Amino acid sequence: MTDEAPKVEARHGRNPGQRILNVSGRLVFPTRVLALEFLEHARVETAPVVILDLRGVTFCDSSGVGALTQLLDTFKRENRRLAIVPSDRVKFVLGIAQVIDFFTKFPTVEEAEDAVVPR
């Protein structure tokens, strides 16, 4: 097992107020510090809309599910919008955890950009 956090790269979305976070690697957090670093990296994006592109995620465990649901809760409290573009693996794990329906999800980043715009 590796203690390496997933790689996260940010870019602007097509619409004003959107940020895309490309997440790749393993969505696994063997330590609380790594989970907090991931959450802070995603939360620091101040755009009203953040789209997590998770298609590059090769593995996700319960710590990854926990980080995603915590991030979703944070965005709701801040009255911001979060959408995900899950890989098949992430979609499967979120389904097993019975939290998939809590997320606004899209098959492509482009569809998410068109549908999830700042209020």
Image (cartoon, rainbow, N blue to C red):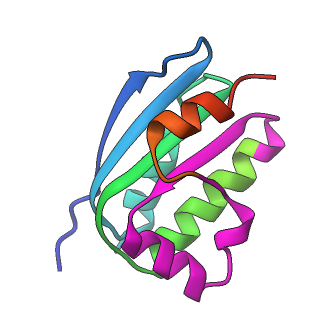
Instruction: Farthest residue to the left: give it.
Output: 2
Measuring 21% from the left and 61% from the top, which residue is drawn there?
A: 4
In this view, the residue farthest toward the top is 16
> Whole-percent x and y of residue 100?
64, 71
Q: Is residue 65 above or below residue 84?
A: below
Residue 117 is situated, as x and y percent measured from the top left of the image, at 69, 25
Task: Judge whether residue 111 can be spotted in this image.
Answer: yes
- Hey, which quadrant is residue 11 in on the image? top left
View extreme (bottom): residue: 96
Q: Is residue 61 left or right of residue 101?
A: left
Task: Give me the residue at 48% from left, 80% from top.
Answer: 92
The magenta stretch spans which residues?
76-105
Image coordinates for residue 52, horizontal then vertical, percent: 48, 45
> Image height check: is 66 above or below 22?
below
Residue 29: image quadrant is bottom left
Residue 41 shows in this picture:
no
In the picture, which quadrant includes the C terminus? top right
Residue 77 on the magenta segment: yes
The quarter of the rendered structure image containing the N terminus is bottom left
Figure label count: 0
Residue drawn at (74%, 34%) of the image: 80
With 50 as the anchor, is 9 left or right in this view? left
Q: Residue 105's spot in the image, x, y percent?
A: 60, 55
25 or 108: which is nearer to us? Answer: 108
The residue located at (45%, 32%) in the rendering is: 20
Q: Reply yes or no: does residue 84 show up in magenta.
A: yes
